[in-house]
Image: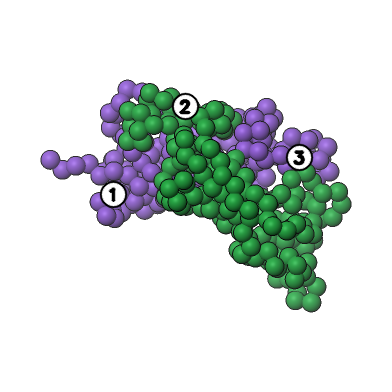
Amino acid sequence: MTTPASTGNTVISEELRSFIHLESVPVTYDIECHAVERFAAAIGDPNPLYSDREASEATSHGGLIAPPTFFRSLLPGKYPKTYPEPFAHILDGGSKYRFNEPVRIGDKITVVRKITDLFEKHGRMGTMLFKISEISYTNEAGRLVATQTTTTITYGTGEKDSGVGDN
Amino acid sequence: MAITNSAVGTQILFFEDINIGDQLPEIVKNPDTRQLVMYAGASQDFVAIHYDLNVAKEAGHPTVIIHGALKSAWLGELVTSWMGVDGRLLELDVSYRAIDFPNSTATCVGKVLDARTEHGVGIVELEIGLRNSEGIISTPGRALVSLPIREIV
């Protein structure tokens, strides 16, 4: 069971709150076929649209594309200041993707992340901080190809897990 | 499903060929720790709980845990392999309700919740989920796809 956080005792400091709507430094990735092939192999997806150039060219896509969750590998850049993560452990709560068009090999995709909400809950694992982030993926023509809205949960004290604070 | 190309995975699924309540062909995954390491490298997700047994045990787990995003990738495959080469994935929502472990079976399941036409294409809403070895849907989700409508000649 979780209960709403009391207003008097919060981990969401003014400093943390100042990150809401702050944009990460944009990072641009060249989408290249080997990275896409490696990603498709890692998730175990044999779809020829990700690796068989000839087969993909014969389809309405006209060439190779990336799997929908390939966006996960296009890491956002850092925020202009250091995010003061109060907790040590991290859980991924989920993702909501909105796709406008598939990513093609040869695209240049610019990634920007911003936190849209921070809230806390108290439960079995103590206080948990929920962070809602929206990540935008824009191609070289300036078209927004997709967004990913993520829920990240951090909790607990002690030595920080590797990767905590990265996102 | 109409087969218009002999290559595997390049079939076309038309809106007229689906019905509300249809089940998607299930996809079964048997992940091992090797796949988690491959996914960590391919996705640049180096959170240690996915490959370091000590970190996973300190967090109270019997072994390392599967990346949530790997489970969402499998649910993406469930939908994209079903929708055919002219289908377009519009939305994919996944929620990680329970932790899953490697060396177990994960089955991706889905069914058609709604189907309608908009602006000359079919819009299909799917309920999707990952069912673990215990029969629990650990990762529920939904997807929205567009499908081509057959030309009326």
Camera-nearest residue between A116 and B80 = A116
Residue B110 image point, x, y percent: 46, 43
Q: Residues within 10 Å of mark 2 (few under 14, many from 20)?
A: many
- Among the chains pictured, the one given purple colouring is B
Q: Residue at x 62, y 38 (%)?
A: B43
Q: Residue at x 81, y 40 (%)?
A: B55
Q: Chain of mark 2?
A: A
Q: Nearer the viewer, mark 2 or mark 1?
A: 2
Is residue B14 left or right of B53 when viewed as pictured?
left
Q: Which residue is mark 1?
A: B121
Q: Is residue A50 above or below residue A72?
A: above
- The residues bearing labels 3 and 2 have C-alpha atoms spaced at a distance of 29 Å
Quadrant location, the N terminus of chain A? bottom right
* Amino acid residing under circle 3: Ala
Q: Are marks 3 and 2 in contact (CB under 8 Å)?
A: no
Is residue B33 left or right of A156 when viewed as pictured?
left
Q: Which residue is mark 3?
A: B48
* Amino acid residing under circle 2: Ser
Q: Residue at x 67, y 45 (%)?
A: B99
Is residue A18 left or right of A148 when viewed as pictured?
right
Label 1: element kind? strand
Q: Is residue A33 above or below residue A117?
A: above
- The residues bearing labels 2 and 1 have C-alpha atoms spaced at a distance of 27 Å
Q: Which residue is mark 2?
A: A51
Label 2: element kind? loop
Residue A19 image point, x, y percent: 68, 64
Q: Nearer the viewer, mark 3 or mark 2?
A: 2
Tell which circle, 3 or 1, labels the residue nearer the N-terminal end.
3
Q: Are marks 2 and 1 in contact (CB under 8 Å)?
A: no
* Amino acid residing under circle 1: Val
Locate residue B56: give its quadrant. top right
Label 3: element kind? helix
